[in-house]
Image (spheres, grey):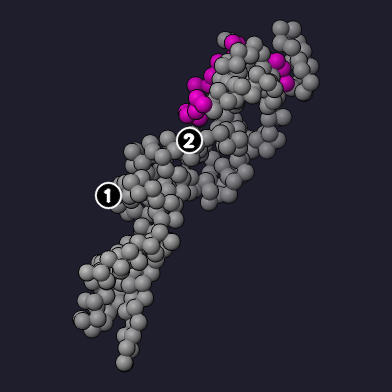
Amino acid sequence: MSSNRLGKGLGALIRPEKESKKKPSKKSIDKPGVMEVRVKDIHPNPNQPRREFDQNALEELANSIKLKGVVTPVTVRVTEKGYELIAGERRWRASKISRKQKIPAYVINVKNDAEIMEIALIENVQREDLNPLEESEAYAVLNSKFGMSHNEIAMAVGKKRVTISNSLRLLKLPTEIRRSLRKGIISAGHARAILQGKTLSQMMNAWKKIIDNGLSVRDAEALFKRSTAIKKNKTVRSFSPQVKAIEDQLIEILGTKVKLKAGKDGGSIEISYYSNDDLDRIIDLIETVSLK
């Protein structure tokens, strides 16, 4: 599909109104290129990028459709069986639940399966109908199957190139973590924090801590910042063996970056924290030690 065609939006693909009027069995309504199509004549797109449909949300949409109808037309193409759905499967499913006989639809002028899939992916991403992992998978298909660069994908869906690159990184997560992201157990922010892990073990440990402790994205990011800080303290700075031993002991007890600044007649101790929860944790540890 050419980028010029994509830039014009669906308008460049919709059948002219005159051609629509040639089909007497399909009632034309008050929008150019839009027709009323029987719900039972529409079948889903086998390459639909969206895989998750929340049943409760579908019921709510069905109730809305009963009252107000389908406000935004679905997008379809003509096939031998009737119509193949390209965009709007959620609206189509909800229309079936609400027992609608007909719904408004854009009928587009494309026949190539690859072109149809590209439109479906871009339409879903632009409408924010995909969960983070479905979006990543959609970008991966545009990149691998259609040869689109990260920059070309970004231009097509109206996002920054770095957003596309960061999204594609989510596919590097272990299967179990990807599954929890797809189900909404963790967010895309949590997933990006987990990707800071350099080994499978590090990523899985971070994932378990996030779920078991209900960590925020900020706290999840702090898991790796704290680990990095500890390593730097152990390898970069050097003091007298006695001061170094005390510093290492404090790092071990507090589980965070600790810096001892020794002067001629005294010094100071600097303790780092990375969130309010982290600060509370450190204070609790200090109070526990002081009570012993």
Question: Is residue 164 in view from this perspective?
Answer: yes
Looking at the image, residue 108 sits to the left or right of residue 171; the answer is right
Looking at the image, residue 78 sits to the left or right of residue 26; the answer is left
- Residue at 38 percent across and 62 percent down: it is 280
Point out the residue furthest to the top here.
Answer: 25
Q: Amino acid at mark 1?
A: Ser
Q: Position of residue 231 (x, y in %)?
A: 29, 67
Image quadrant in which the N terminus is located: top right
- Residue at 72 percent across and 29 percent down: it is 11
Q: Is residue 42 magenta?
A: yes
Whether 122 is drawn above or below 16: the answer is below
Q: Position of residue 51 (x, y in %)?
A: 47, 28
- Residue wearing tag 2: 134
Whether 51 is drawn above or below 43: the answer is below
Q: Quadrant of residue 65?
A: top right
Q: Position of residue 247 (x, y in %)?
A: 27, 75
- Using a 10 Å C-alpha cutoff, classify the residue at mark 1 as few (fewer than 14 neighbours), some (14 to 19) or many (20 or more): few
- In terms of sequence position, does the residue under pointer 2 or pointer 1 come before the other? 2
Q: Disc number at residue 201?
A: 1
